[in-house]
Image (cartoon, helix red, strand yellow):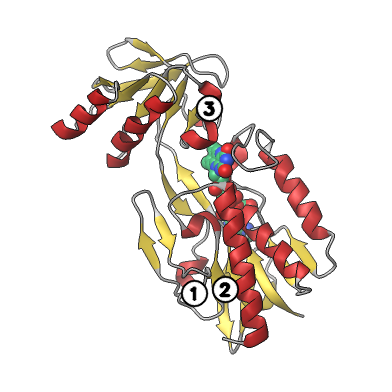
């Protein structure tokens, strides 16, 4: 069977697209490896009707609602590669099989490359966070740290005082005098000493231990890690990719079409600002574009 659309990645972007295509009575195959980017967080915030919900439970509801449509199929398998064969796409799977679709939607998301600091990885999504709009409110007026990882970190540190008192851990790095002046203006404390490890019970955080042995009390640490695509399928297909400040981004037009005819992309892989709301909106936009293309050609 040739599906109208194969979707690589069945999370917020992919499932949103699948829902719209299913409601247009089109056949859809969703391929998914079950590792959405926010799986480390206990609660998701900022998405209407689900503010504070368990992200896993949100996706279970989404998937169940999509699965209720008879034209949708799911395979919990990794897509390895995709090639065009005449006017069809052939997607190879990790089990050795292959599937065929008229259109392809890439929604495989990104992974965060966390700094190698003792105590950090196990607190990711709990007390080590990256998006203040997603998780800042839960620490209202508590003590924040921002870890210097890239030039973007100083920008992040300038913003965080909106949520509470902030220390910028330079971690042995340097900043330009105008950046230091801006941080000072915002009331940010600058700590130049290199950082040794994170301290606290379980996934909670009580301090950052500096290399000189001093423990600086904090309740939450912001980091802005680089990220990477979860799959190289976009590049293998010849999709144009741009370098953003924290990782690669698939180039798409306003309808989420890539430069490769018949290939669309949605969600975190196509933008710099990453939220569930954006990912779902991207999926809907891609689905509308795909449907129009199936009906009118092009
Ligand atoms: C710790 C953390 C907390 C967050 N909290 C929030 C929050 O509170 N609110 C908010 O709005 N946003 C939050 N986000 C951002 C949010 O997680 C992302 O914006 C959103 O998940 C992007 O959706 P997506 O569908 O593009 O990608 P993802 O959700 O990452 O989904 C990609 C899917 O593709 C699958 N996949 C990957 N490769 C393949 C392959 N080759 N074949 C088949 N399947 C594949 C993966 O398993 C996954 O299911 C958070 C992010 C992080 C890291």
Q: Are marks 1 and 2 in contact (CB under 8 Å)?
A: yes
Q: Which of marks 1 and 2 is nearer the N terminus?
A: 2
Look at the picture and state if 180 lies above or below 165: below
Q: Label 2: state its secondary structure.
A: strand
Q: Which of marks 1 and 3 is nearer the N terminus?
A: 3
Residue at mark 2 = 82
* Residue at x 27% of width, y 40% of height: 151
Q: Residues within 10 Å of mark 3 (few under 14, many from 20)?
A: some
Residue at mark 3 = 137
- For the residues labelled 2 and 3, the Cα–Cα distance comes to 41 Å
The one of 138 and 195 positioned closer to us in this rendering: 138
Of all residues, the one furthest to the top in this rendering is 214
* Residue at x 47% of width, y 44% of height: 112
Q: Label 3: state its secondary structure.
A: helix
Q: Do the residues labelled 2 and 3 touch (CB within 8 Å)?
A: no
Q: Label 1: state its secondary structure.
A: helix
- For the residues labelled 1 and 3, the Cα–Cα distance comes to 41 Å
* Residue at x 64% of width, y 33% of height: 43
Looking at the rendering, in which quadrant would you find the C terminus? bottom right
Residue at mark 1 = 237
């Amino acid at each position: 069977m040739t599906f109208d659309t194969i979707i690589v990645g069945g999370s917020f972007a992919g499932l949103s697209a699948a829902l719209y295509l299913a409601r247009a009575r089109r056949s859809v195959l969703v391929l998914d490896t079950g590792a959405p980017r926010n799986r480390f967080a206990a609660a998701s915030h900022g998405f209407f009707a689900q503010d504070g919900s368990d992200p896993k439970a949100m996706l279970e509801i989404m998937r169940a609602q999509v699965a209720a449509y008879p034209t949708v199929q799911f395979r919990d398998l990794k897509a390895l590669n995709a090639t065009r064969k005449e006017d069809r796409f052939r997607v190879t799977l990790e089990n050795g099989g292959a599937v065929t679709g008229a259109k392809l939607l890439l929604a495989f998301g990104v992974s965060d490359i966390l700094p190698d600091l003792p105590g950090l990885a196990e607190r990711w999504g709990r007390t080590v966070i990256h998006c203040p709009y997603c998780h800042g409110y839960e620490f209202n007026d508590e003590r924040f740290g921002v870890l210097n990882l890239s030039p973007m970190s100083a920008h992040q540190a300038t913003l965080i005082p909106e949520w509470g008192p902030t220390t910028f851990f330079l971690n042995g790095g340097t900043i330009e005098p105008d950046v230091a002046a801006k941080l000072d203006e915002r009331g940010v404390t600058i700590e130049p000493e290199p950082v040794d490890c994170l301290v606290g019970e379980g996934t909670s955080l009580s301090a950052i231990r500096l290399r000189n042995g001093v423990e600086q009390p904090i309740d939450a640490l912001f980091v802005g890690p680089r990220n990477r695509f979860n799959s190289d399928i976009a590049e293998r297909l010849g999709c144009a990719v741009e370098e953003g400040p924290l990782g690669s981004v698939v180039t798409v037009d306003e309808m989420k079409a890539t430069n490769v005819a018949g290939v669309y992309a949605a969600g975190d892989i196509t933008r710099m600002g990453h939220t569930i709301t954006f990912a779902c909106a991207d999926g809907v936009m891609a689905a509308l574009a795909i449907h129009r293309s199936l009906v009118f050609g092009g």
